[in-house]
Image: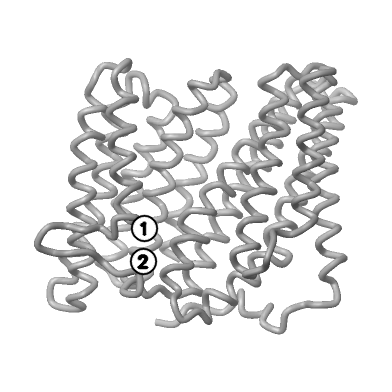
Amino acid sequence: MAELFFDLVFVFAVTQFSHALLAHSSWAEALRLALLFVAVWMVWMYTVWFTNYADPERAPVRIALFVAMALGLLLSVSIPQAFGALGALFACAYVAMQLGRTSYFVFILRDEQPQLRRNNQRVAVWQAVAAVFWLIGGFAEPGARLGWWVLAFAIDFASPWCAYWVPGLGAARIGEWTVDGNHMAERCALFVIIALGESLLVTGATFARLEWTAAVRAVFASAFVGTVAMWWLYFDRGMVEAHHRIAHSSDPGRQARADYSYLHFFIVAAIIVCAAGDELAMAHPAHADGAAVAVMVGGPALYLLSVGGFKWLSRRRTRPPLSHLVGLGLLALLGWAGLRHAPSALALHAAATAVLLLCAVWEHLSLRGSTPAHAGAVTAARPR
């Protein structure tokens, strides 16, 4: 329960991103928000790995999670102005969460699990190097901040691919990062639920403050159906089969890094973009400019691409699901038509929702007779 309590902070963070995406419609601002979202995702994912090894029922681990929650609130508050007046707050909160958590983990492991302690010492060294550039960027002038933070992000991103190699400590091997597959799958599924729940919150809050015209009511219905379709596409089969595979894998660390640490970033990002598209279409149902087309079509396309890739990797099939490939083709045509003919936001949003629903129904019907025997494994508790 402590982990779920910790996740509540990220409901606020996800909401901040969806609102910031609407407030900043340029490509440059969208790229800056993407960088911030990667940072927030890394904070959350490293915490998932932390609680995979450290029992959150222990008082010292719970205290660490509660401290991280406070820092996470500060991190979330600073998101809209991270490239403005609150850059130092974002950088300090990020560094305190990343480096502080890893250093604390090394400390509580000082008398046990020497291999895991060495691995986290390597991680701490890389995070300390990246922290220098996060902090320089946070205190730099806003115009110079992006360059420093891109460098810091590059270090954070490269560290696992370099196996956290450190002079004198060597490199970590992926086989040493043994994870509890049940825990990893459940935690990432919960974050997807958080993002989908935030999408519903945005839809409801926007609908409540607008005049309930026929067009607004139609977009509201389309947004709700689209959120249900996204839930269906992820939870109906993909999450179940991936959960079974990682829980029974001989090398769960490798799958956790590829399928969960990386691919789920794009899944959650797609839901945030879709939530922004829902709010945009509801606020302006009669018109869709180029930015609106990019959001309302790009969000569902990114979702189909990332969820399809997740299912493809988890099933180890020769190709991604056919339904997702067809859906991506239809969305590409829809985006082309939207840019060329400038339809209403209502029509564009409804068409994109129809594609998501089509893919969900198609996949469900095609796999209806092959329900996996391990479907119940999703609710299995993590052993301690």
Identify residue for label 1: 47
Q: Secondary structure at mark 2?
A: helix
Q: Nearest the camera: 340 or 11?
A: 340
Residue at 79% x, 46% y: name it.
327
Residue found at the far right of this picture: 214
Type of the residue with mark 1: Thr
Q: Are marks 2 and 1 in contact (CB under 8 Å)?
A: yes
Report crowding for label 2: few under 14, some 14 to 19, many 20 or more residues within 10 A (C-alpha). some
Residue found at the far front of this picture: 318
Q: Which mark is residue 93?
A: none
| Residue 276 place in picture, x, y as percent | 64, 31
| Residue 260 place in picture, x, y as percent | 50, 60
Q: Quadrant of residue 272?
A: top right
Spatial separation of the CA atoms under disc 2 and disc 1: 6 Å
Residue at 49% x, 22% y: name it.
29
Q: Which mark is residue 51?
A: 2
